[in-house]
Amino acid sequence: MKPGSKAWMMFMKKLYCFSEGILIFSLVAKFLLWQMPELKSPIIVSLTNVSIMTGVFNLAIIYLISMFEPVHVRPDWAIVYPQLRGTKEQKSTKTKK
């Protein structure tokens, strides 16, 4: 997969969503443990801590990888929709009159 290709974009989209899901799920579990102290056990607390760290590290790595993605080029919509050509010129002549 080459950065900027369609396969790369789909992979990164799924990776973003997966990492965000891990992070959100672990944060919700952590908040539930604060609200219900009877659920606190060393195993559950350590699992939530590990999942939060995993989610944050995944996002940090993803953001470092996405730094090398090529910049999105805006398409020229005047090619697709010819009626858009000259709209700036028409607006400037209307304001001068």
Image (cartoon, helix red, strand yellow):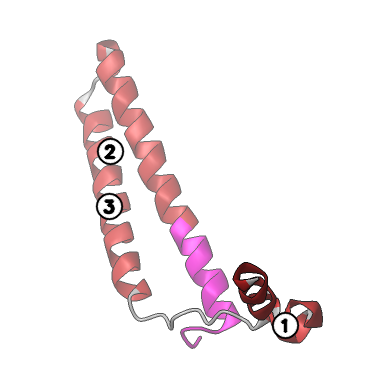
Residue carrying label 3: 56
The amino acid pointed to by label 2 is Leu
Residue carrying label 2: 47
Query: Which residue is pictured at 50% across the width and 79% down the height?
Result: 72
Q: Mark 2 Cα within 10 Å, few/some/many (few <14, many 20+)? A: some
Residue carrying label 1: 85
Where residue 67 sits, quadrant-wise, is bottom left
Q: Mark 3 Cα within 10 Å, few/some/many (few <14, many 20+)? A: some
Where residue 76 sits, quadrant-wise, is bottom right
- 89 over 14 or under it: above or below: below
The amino acid pointed to by label 3 is Val
Instruction: Report x, y in % for residue 69.
Output: 41, 80
The residue mark sitting in front, 1 or 2, is 1
The amino acid pointed to by label 1 is Arg
Marker disc for residue 7: none
**Mark 1 or 2 closer to N-term?**
2
**Mark 3 or 2 closer to N-term?**
2
Query: Which residue is pictured at 37% across the width and 73% down the height?
Result: 66
Q: Residue 10 vs residue 35: left or right?
A: right
Highlighted range, magenta: 1-16
The residue mark sitting in front, 3 or 1, is 1
Instruction: Report x, y in % for residue 34.
Output: 25, 19
Q: Mark 1 Cα within 10 Å, few/some/many (few <14, many 20+)? A: few
Q: What is the C-alpha distance between the residues marked 3 and 1?
A: 46 Å
Query: Which residue is pictured at 46% across the width and 54% down the height?
Result: 18
Q: Residue 7: say if magenta.
A: yes
Instruction: Report x, y in % for residue 62.
Output: 35, 66
Q: Residue 41 vs residue 24: left or right?
A: left
Q: What is the C-alpha distance between the residues marked 3 and 2?
A: 14 Å
- 87 over 39 or under it: above or below: below
Foreground: 2 or 22?
Answer: 2
Q: Residue 67 vs residue 91: left or right?
A: left
